[in-house]
Image (spheres, coloured by chain):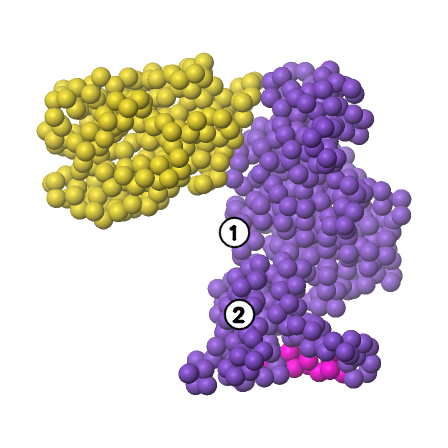
Amino acid sequence: MLIALFADIHANREAFEACLAHARVHRAQHWVFLGDHVNYGADPEWVVGTIMDYVSAGSTAILGNHDAAVAEPRSIMDSPAQPAIEWTRVQLGAAQRAFLAGLPLTVEHGDILFVHADATAPRKWNYVTDRPDAVRSLRATKCRMTFCGHVHRPATYNMSETGRLTAFQPVTGAAVPLLPQRRWLAVIGSVGQPRDGNPAASYAMLDTERSEITYFRVPYDVETAAAKIRQAGLPEILAERLGWGH
Amino acid sequence: MAPPWLREGTTIDGFLIGDLIHQRGMAVIRKVTRPEIAMPMLIKAPSLFEGEDSAAIVSFEMEQMILPRLSGIHVPKFIAAGDFPAHPYIVMEHIAGHSLLGLLEKLPLSYAEVAVIGAKVASALHDLHCQHVIHLDVKPSNIVLRDNGEAALIDFGLSHHDQLPDLMHEQFRIPYGTAPYMAPEQVLGIRSDARSDLFALGVLLYFFSTNLRPFGDPRGKRQLHQRLWRDPIPPRKLRPDYPAWLQEIVLRCLEVDPTRRHPTAAQLAFDLSHPDQVKLTARSERLRRDPWSAVIRRRFNPDAAPSVFKQAVAAQISAAPIVAVAIDLAEGSEALAEALRTTVRRMAEIVPGARFACLNVLKQHRIELDSTLDQEGQNKHLKRLVELKHWAHPLGTLENQITFHVLEAIDPATALLEYARANAVDHVVLGARTDSALRNILGSVSGEVVAKAPCTVTVVRPPRQDDALP
């Protein structure tokens, strides 16, 4: 089965649409949304509505820290996330807020774990940015493969049976074989706010039969997405950084 | 120790296990058959060791990832892989041919034989490098000459794939390789430079042409590191009749700093196939090793270590393309000649690592096939070479990047295309035929080359070509 993995969409409709279309062309059969569907971007209502449609058709969505913040009005985020989260909250209807509030922190699917951040304590939202983080997260689950987001930069890690860890920067379009004798953690890049210097939207496709993951970069209309952020009166930095991919 | 399920006569996933081919070091290899597959096949499984992740297991994992992603005649065809925990194996083509190991008792080989074998291996390496893989264990036992004469590389257990996790590198910080053949940077643990394979091939060429290994068979880290500062005995010292061009090629391959070697395997193959076009430097003349004072300076000078820069294999190759420039001296106008030179200058400026093979096709007539043998034919050939050099003269300092070749053929387009294929040419540059009437009658060489070339083609026209207007 081909599973399209989307993380950190961040209410960026243009990027999300481009990735959905790309994944359809590449024959995705199942869809997983790894959290942080909203905040920062100008289209939270459309993005959450779309994810709700996918979920009601059988797809999987996970809770991210920004989604949790929408659902929890007393939570305080750093600037510029805080003003944006307040704006986002107003944009969403009650049903959408309830949908976000009801999302699970983790979902296990056979030997696969879907989680937004470090699996050790999903609600603590720790980043998996280096080898020790990856070792810790992999040790926190029995699942052979973990897929997460939160970092906004693509990366893969694998651990041998004796606990030796290998890190690898995936190459766009080149399938990485998820050798069955190893345990894997794949950090999917961000759809709506990439931070690795490449402004193109990032997502990945998991082929469960071949046990391979392929990372893709999809160009989208950054100017429109940025213009909408400015139009909504959201902090300028949120519009600007889309163009840098940082 | 061989895994118990890998015994002769047992069947695994439909494959009937046959004779033992090899059981040494990291792997066990046996013949294998399956009724519906006619191709001769091998099964390869890691030797089993207790405890830690052994290098045998990890190198097997590397090959398990790399081999299915390779294609072409220069590698064994991948057939199947087993389930890892229960039956770790790879089934692949058993290449019909001979390992270069069989040549060891005939050493030294003739210089011509060494060049032919070297060019074939370099072409195979170029094909591998184009598929993002650096072999890192080039040695006679890992090279098979197919029955059709092409070289194939086997055993990718120590290889590096640019687009896959490098488990060998991450799990074993000590370098793996075969001591006599390892490049200096590989000895230092660097696995990402395609030119490490050119060093190993240089060791092989040296060995095959002198019957001596340039760095012996070192044991232990201290001996292995000596190649970082101690240069090998120049082959001419060992065999006084050693040709200058071959010494130039071999010692260039054995340079400590990869940036001083051939930039790509394709360029090395090119030199080995065109001995008369090898640019000779002081290397080719050398008769003794460097004095101890120089060796000691290198030994204790940290700046003398090989340059290290991480670059994808594809980028390494594209930084040093082979450009074939076809020059039609017979009818080309001076304006076209200048336009071609301008194109070459621009390319050399953008890609300083490019080399330019200037080609001219000496047309043969079917009825006079042997005319090249007579004096007139030789004169014609020589005249064309002189004219080609005259064309290139204004390019001045680019001289060291340019070689000259007169091809003799009945059909110019076919000759150019064959040349491009045989020499792994990356880019063909040629002038458009200026005379539109002639083009209508004879057809366009550039048109055919554009349509059929295995690479990028640039068709050059001079800025104002009035006769091309309708």
Count every numbered label the image shows and give the total: 2
Q: Position of residue B416 (x, y in %)?
A: 63, 68
Residue at x 82% of width, y 56% of height: B113
Q: Is residue B447 left or right of residue B236?
A: left
Kindly indicate the quadrant of the structure image that contains residue B321: bottom right
x and y percentages locating residue A223 in the rendered image: 23, 48
- Residue placed under numbered mark 2 in the picture: B447
**Magenta range:** B378-391
Q: Which residue is mark 1?
A: B315
Q: What shade has chain B been given?
A: purple
Residue B175, position in %: x, y? 64, 35
Confirm whether residue B75 shows in the render. yes
Judging from the image, mark 1 belongs to the subunit labelled B
Between the C-alphas of marks 1 and 2, the distance is 29 Å
Task: Count residues near mark 2 (Cα–Cα under 10 Å), then give few for <14, some for 14-19, many for 20+.
Answer: few
Q: Tell me: B135 left or right of A48.
A: right
Position in image of residue B33 (x %, y %): 74, 28
Determine whether A40 is above or below B419 in the image. Answer: above
Q: What amino acid does circle 2 point to?
A: Gly
- Residue B178 visible? The answer is no
Which one of the lettered chains is coloured yellow? A
Who comes first in sequence, dot 1 or dot 2? 1
- Secondary structure at badge 2 equals helix
A146 is within the stretch colored magenta: no
